[in-house]
Amino acid sequence: MDSWLGNKKRILVLNREDMISKEDRNAWATYFARQGVKVIFANGQLGMGTMKLGRFAKALGASVNIKRRAKGLLPRPVRAGVVGYPNVGKSSLINRLLKRRMCPAAPRPGVTRELKWVQFGKDLELLDSPGIIPMRISDQSAAVKLAVCDDIGERSYNFVDVAAILVQLLTQLPAAGRDFVNFQLIAYYLWTLILKLFPLPGEKALHNRYKIDADGNCGKIFVHKLALHLFNGDDHQAAFRILSDFRKGKFGWVSLERPPKQHCC
């Protein structure tokens, strides 16, 4: 984003805030605050955060026209692009801001296929655009998480492989605020005992949902267990169920990423 936008003014919006836990939301809010980054949490479907976003966008647009007047230029509607990955709710967010359905929106990637300018008040124009995916994603873990969250087309990945990685992520992801690094420093037998006494949230959620114990060392084993349990050994159907359940919040709302650790000087 930094290389695309340069010095242009921007607003960072974290949409679908209802799809992560309150603890995860607070952790990311604290992280961005320490970075000095203005961030707005929103929910395009329900309208949460959109009034604040609208006020902030209009104020930012007005500041651009103040600079134009100082240069002797006439004010004009400021144009702003709404950009992000596919299926993150960009069009829904615009519709909420406008308080009417101007942009097609649906909970799947690829619905928006063309650029569309819409008027937001008299001083601001918003550009609805198709989702953007970098030509080359060097971090493969990021690519897998995009697949897990249904942000790329289903033909782009193998369901069983992605579901298996999701299971491993869930069984190894600590609760927000739980210091995983400190646990790794203790002896292995004590770590194993702690996991038995206090299962990680994702591991417990998987067991509660399917009544099958998760093996954190191999997600494919869990996928195959579920296939035998519910789908006559069909791993693809089992993988589809796991991914679908995660996207619907059946394991509870959880963020697959936590803010980077910040070290004090």
Image: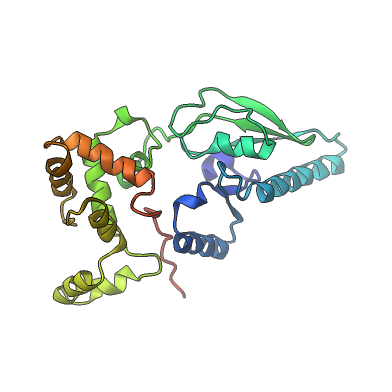
From the top left corner, tell me how far across and down residue 263 is, in percent.
Answer: 43, 71
Near-viewer residue (152 or 175) = 175
Q: Residue at x 30, y 70 (%)?
A: 181
Say if residue 83 shows up in the picture.
no
Tag count in the figure? 0
Instruction: Place residue 164 in its image quadrant.
Output: top left
Near-viewer residue (153 or 100) = 100
Q: Is residue 70 left or right of residue 91?
A: right
Q: Residue at x 24, y 34 (%)?
A: 158
Q: Is residue 21 left or right of residue 199?
A: right
From the top left corner, tell me how far across and down residue 258 is, in percent.
Answer: 40, 59
The residue lying furthest to the top in this view is 114
Q: Is residue 40 left or right of residue 257?
A: right
Q: Residue at x 14, y 75 (%)?
A: 189
Instruction: Name above or below for residue 73 compared with residue 142.
Output: above
Q: Is residue 111 left or right of residue 93?
A: left
From the top left corner, tell me how far across and down residue 103 is, in percent.
Answer: 60, 28
Near-viewer residue (96 or 228) = 228
Instruction: Place residue 144 in its image quadrant.
Output: top left
Instruction: Name above or below for residue 255 compared with residue 69.
Output: below
Q: Residue at x 38, y 42 (%)?
A: 149
Instruction: Name above or below for residue 230 compared with residue 214.
Output: above
